[in-house]
Image (spheres, rainbow, N blue to C red):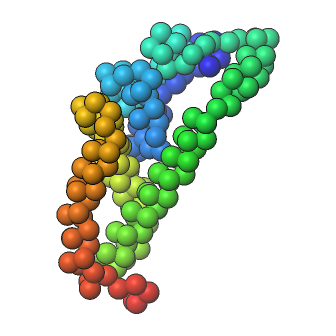
């Protein structure tokens, strides 16, 4: 639901700051409006008006004036389903993954980073995670929804990274400066 106003804009405003969008918004956008519209918004930083967001399927309804509070309360009760809980859990996991990624890189190269460098590393990590996450849905579709095979394949894909970590384990010094 969105407010039916000429001032309402939806999109990824962080793009205009040079920051990769993260925490699942791009994946949810692809599921709601498709790859083409999502790419248009992510690659250009374009914000869409409420009416266009409704046409695309980004929002389910537009409300305004007195209907806004009533519509919000109705939708709160309707949407109180497991999916928002799952999305929140996904967001928390993604945030932790970003912090863990930057912490690992810091340990690997034995240095700390400025806020700007941290933001850049977080954007790189988010870009990789978003790319892999968006392609995993396509892989499951290609496998005709066979999640078992998907998990076996992803496990096999992780093995080279684990081998690399095992090879460099002696170069990582925890707590030593």
- Say which residue appears at 41% left-offset and 45% top-offset: 19
Residue 17 versus residue 96 in the image, above or below: above
- Give x and y (percent) for residue 72: 73, 22
- Give x and y (percent) for residue 111: 37, 77
Along the viewing direction, whichever of 173 and 92 lies nearer the viewer:
92
Q: Quadrant of residue 44?
A: top left
Residue 49 appears in the figure? no
- Say which residue appears at 61% left-offset and 41% top-offset: 85
Q: How many marks?
A: 0
Q: Please identify the quadrant where the N terminus is shown.
A: top right
Q: Is residue 170 left or right of residue 111?
A: left
- Say which residue appears at 31% left-offset and 82% top-offset: 172
- Give x and y (percent) for residue 140: 30, 36
Q: Is residue 108 left or right of residue 32?
A: left
Along the viewing direction, whichever of 123 and 173 lies nearer the viewer:
173
- Give x and y (percent) for residue 173: 35, 85
Residue 85 versus residue 114 in the image, above or below: above
Q: Quadrant of residue 145?
A: top left
Residue 129 versus residue 102 in the image, above or below: above
Q: Please identify the quadrant where the C terminus is shown.
A: bottom left
Along the viewing direction, whichever of 147 and 119 lies nearer the viewer:
147
Q: Quadrant of residue 39?
A: top left
Q: Is residue 27 left or right of residue 4?
A: left
Residue reaching furthest bottom?
176
Residue 174 appears in the figure? yes
- Say which residue appears at 73% left-offset and 26% top-offset: 77
Q: Is residue 158 left or right of residue 37?
A: left
């Amino acid at each position: 639901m969105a407010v039916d106003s000429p001032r309402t804009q939806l999109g990824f405003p962080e793009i205009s700051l040079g920051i990769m969008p993260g925490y699942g918004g791009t994946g949810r956008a692809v599921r709601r409006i498709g790859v083409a519209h999502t790419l248009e918004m992510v690659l250009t930083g374009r914000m869409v008006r409420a009416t266009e967001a409704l046409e695309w399927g980004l929002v389910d309804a537009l409300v305004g004036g007195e209907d806004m509070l009533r519509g919000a309360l109705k939708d709160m009760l309707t949407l109180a389903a497991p999916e928002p809980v799952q999305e929140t859990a996904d967001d928390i996991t993604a945030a932790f993954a970003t912090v863990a990624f930057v912490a690992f890189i810091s340990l690997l190269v034995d240095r700390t980073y400025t806020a700007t460098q941290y933001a850049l590393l977080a954007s790189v990590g988010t870009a990789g995670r978003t790319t892999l996450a968006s392609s995993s849905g396509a892989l499951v579709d290609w496998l005709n929804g066979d999640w078992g095979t998907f998990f076996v394949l992803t496990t096999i894909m992780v093995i080279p990274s684990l081998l690399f970590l095992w090879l460099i384990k002696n170069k990582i010094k925890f707590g030593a400066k």
